[in-house]
Amino acid sequence: DIQMTQSPSSVSASVGDRVTITCRASQGIRSWLAWYQQKPGKAPKLLIYAASSLQSGVPSRFSGSGSGTDFTLTISSLQPEDFGNYYCQQANSFPLTFGPGTKVDIK
Amino acid sequence: EVQLVESGGGLVKPGGSLRLSCAASGFTFSSYSMIWVRQAPGKGLEWVSSISSSSSYIYYPDSVKGRFTISRDNAKNSLYLQMNSLRAEDTAVYYCARDEGGGSYFFDYWGQGTLVTVSS
């Protein structure tokens, strides 16, 4: 099974800050990676797929990069509505696996 | 508008069974792979099962294999999860979600979730 790790586990930042979240796969997954945002009590929302493709309707301040084992989600200018948990997910092989999540708080 | 609405959750005793349903609308259901994902209280996301558009390909993680069965009825635009031999560790919110296309296993639309509680 492919294990996904994320760092940091939590981040507190101010509005306007640049926030970077890292996801690492235990083996190469090419670009088969997605990023989701989840707010408390709500379903996850797809932000980025195929490592760097922005999902329709998602603000351009979100971007993804990476391939192989190391990936990054960047929020270029943090907005108040960006609080929540962020999860990476690999789609390279079954079982599909998610990272443990990164909690983003607004200072 | 794409909508996914789960139902069928509730309280069940260990060893019991439950069948979850997911009603889809707003898209051509028969053209998309679908999945179930669960989230235990206060925990992260865990993939539970996947089914291709024509039910030809079905996958489970070891944690539910042999106990859970995914199925779909394309005529009824519905996805199902039959859960047997339930354990306390199966307690979670269960979400259905749609593959964004082409069997990529990235998921672009999610239901609101249904809570399953396994407890005596």
Image (spheres, coloured by chain):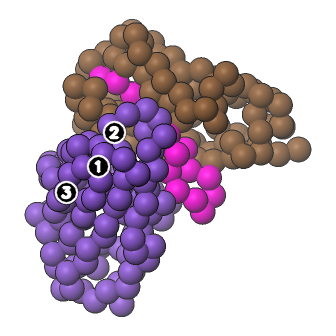
Label 1 resides on the chain identified as: A
Q: Tag 2, which secondary structure?
A: loop
Verify CB contact (< 8 Å) between mark 2 and mark 1: yes
Q: Residue at x 31, y 86 (%)?
A: A13
Nearer the observer, A105 or A63 = A63
Q: Which residue is mark 2?
A: A91
- Chain A color in figure: purple
**Residue extending farthest right:** B120
Q: Of callouts 3 and 1, which one flags the residue occurring earlier in the amino acid sequence?
A: 1
Quadrant of image for the N terminus of chain B: top left
Which residue in the structure is indicated by mark 3?
Answer: A66
Q: Residue tagged by mark 1?
A: A34
Give the residue at x 83% y 31%.
B15
Classify residue B109 as left or right of residue B59.
left
Label 3 environment density (alpha carbons within 10 Å; few <14, some 14–19, many ≥20): some
Are tags 3 and 2 found on a single chain? yes
Report the span colored magenta. Answer: B32-47
